[in-house]
Amino acid sequence: MAVKAGGPDPNSNSRLRDAIAKAKSNNMPNDTIDRSIKKAAGNLDAVNYEAITYEGYGPKGVAVIVETLTDNKNRSAANVRSAFTKGGGNMGTTGCVSFMFDEKGQIIIEKSDDLDGEELEMIAIEAGAEDISEEEDSFEILTAPDDFSAVREALEKAGIEMAEAEISMIPQTYTELTDEEDIKKMNKLLDMLDEDDDVKNVYHNWNE
């Protein structure tokens, strides 16, 4: 989809650059990445995938957003609806929970002995990051979606390894589940979505 939207050259296609970076962070070999780009660029008859987002509620009103990439909208809708139902929740209308999330670029960097936190902060902020916070064993950098590529590339240029780097939906508030049955149902919902090949990303505000 990135290639079809902006061409096969990552130098002029920031969306493709981000997709390549994410693939590399998941240890995908370079030749596999190159083959995928060439296939997408050269095969006009390739399957057309469509991005569709579903929203709904898990047990006790947990907000859930499901991003899919599919070549069959009916199959995706049925599978996602089934996951919500079997997970003790229900699928809602577009916009029913997305207002409870902020779309942000999110970069996670694991702490190490040779990583200077102050230098990291300076590089990130100068490149356009909105915020950087220090956790027990990592740093989290948040950016506006439009600034994500610039920040990720600045860190990459500085030789800083990233454990995660993607556009994400960050919950504004979190929901607690205390009942064992609700927790079991919520895990079932997430497991079913995770097993669905059409599902690309799942965001929720359950405080696990």
Image (cartoon, rainbow, N blue to C red):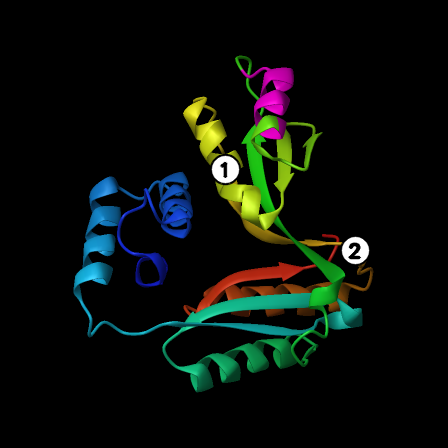
**What is the three-letter code of the residue carrying label 1?**
Ala
Per the rendering, the mark at residue 174 is 2
Left or right of 50? Residue 9 is: left
Taking the spot 27% from the left edge, 74% from the top edge, the residue there is: 47
Pointer 2 with pointer 1, Cβ within 8 A: no
* Local secondary structure at mark 1: helix
Counting from the top left corner in percent of width and height, residue 11 is at 32, 42
Residue 150's mark? 1
What is the three-letter code of the residue carrying label 2? Tyr
Tell me where residue 120 sits by quadrant. Answer: top right
Which SS class for mark 2? loop
Which label belongs to residue 110?
Answer: none
Label 1 Cα crowd, 10 Å radius (few <14 / some 14-19 / many 20+): some
11 or 199, which is in the foreground? 11
Q: Is any part of residue 205 visible from this angle?
A: no
Q: Position of residue 79 (x, y in %)?
A: 50, 80
Answer above or below: position of 138 versus 193: above
Query: At which x and y percent is residue 158?
Result: 45, 22
Which class describes the residues within 10 Å of circle 2: few (<14), some (14-19), or many (20+)? some
83 left or right of 206?
left
The number of numbered discs placed on residues in the rendered structure image is 2
Residues at marks 2 and 1, CA–CA distance in whole angstroms: 29 Å
Q: Which residue is drawn at the image coordinates 62% and 42% (left, top)? A: 143
Q: Residue at x 57, y 68 (%)?
A: 66
Residue interval drawn in magenta: 115-125
N-terminal-most mark, 2 or 1: 1
In this view, which residue lies farthest toward the front?
A: 12
